[in-house]
Amino acid sequence: MQIETQLIGRPIDTAFHTEFRVGVNGFLWDDAKWGFEHIHTDRSKKVFGRNGYDTELPWKTDGDYILLCMQKVGDASLRGADIFTWTEQTVKEIRQHTERQIIVRPHPLYRKKTQHAKCKEAVCDYFNVQWQETDVTQKGFVPIQEQLLNAWCTVTYSSGTGVDAVINGVPNIACDTGSMVYEVSSNDVSEVENPYRGNKKEWTNKIAHCQWSIDEFESGECWEHVSKSI
């Protein structure tokens, strides 16, 4: 069993969580056993509700910019991909399909000052690209929930920001199959002007079966589900 950070309602300002992602032999959408074949009940409203989200929130159909979200340098969820190379290539590709403003949002933790500076210089050479300063330790930090309010869509590799986007009704483009929102996202940047806005009811229940509270650990509810995949 692998225990990872939570997906729905994940905090950015603390290392202390009360809910966790729990998978068997993995922690990403396409490599873990999540027990989806054993689902017989709907716990989506329970999990979404206690974290302050509505499972039936409709997709947004407007927005001022495309939010491209980077990830921690060298994070396991990148599975060897270089986040700086991906960011530069993705900005270049987006520009082939739209002239909408692109805001590049670095991960707020684990800075590589020199590499981030080079990446910023490279992407800002493109038309209508803005680099968002997001250092969580600095005054003026902009939370992702705030930046999602006016986003047309997000573009992610396998970032949990994709989950933040989808549960807030913002369409997402997921570039890696490990993304926890891969099946409710567009999977190609060419779809940036018409991103996925399809049904997400089944996904909300699936993702709710990936996340468990400490109370559900103690009651055995989590083990009852997860153990079927071992």
Image: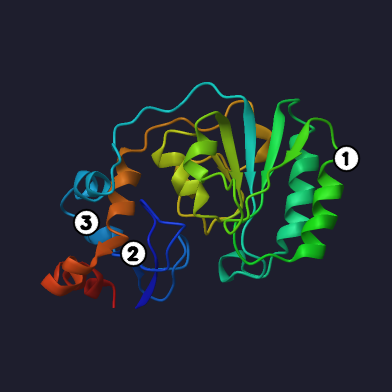
The three-letter amino acid code for the residue at tag 2 is Trp
Looking at the image, which residue is at 82% across and 56% down?
117
Amino acid on which the number 3 mark rests in the picture: Ile
Question: Residue 34 shows which numbered tag?
Answer: 2
User: Would you say 228 lies left or right of 118 here?
Assistant: left
Disc nearest the viewer among 2 and 1: 1
Please report whichever mark, 2 or 3, sits nearer to the chain's N-terminal start. 2
Q: Give the residue type that dot 1 points to.
A: Asp
Tell me the crowding category of disc 2: few under 14, some 14 to 19, or many 20 or more residues within 10 angstroms, Cα based: many
Q: Secondary structure at mark 2?
A: loop
| Cα distance in 3D space between marks 1 and 3 | 48 Å
Which image quadrant: the N terminus? Answer: bottom left
Q: CA gap, disc 2 to disc 3?
A: 10 Å
Q: CA distance from mark 2 to mark 1?
A: 42 Å
Q: Residue at x 83, y 41 (%)?
A: 124
Instruction: Give the x, y percent position of residue 94.
Output: 74, 36
Q: Is residue 90 above or below residue 197?
A: below
Tell me if I can see residue 113 in this picture: yes
Taking depth in this image into account, of 96 and 48 the one nearest to the observer is 48
Which residue sits furthest top?
62
Image-quadrant location for residue 36: bottom left
Q: Is residue 171 visible?
A: no
Q: Residue 170: x percent and y percent?
A: 48, 34
Secondary structure of the residue carrying numbered label 1 = loop
Relative to residue 135, is residue 91 drawn left or right? Answer: right
* The label number, if any, that marks residue 125 in the structure image: 1
> Which residue is more in the foreground, 65 or 98?
65
Does residue 112 appear left or right of residue 212 in this picture?
A: right
Q: Which mark is residue 39?
A: 3
SS at mark 3 in the image? loop
Image mark count: 3
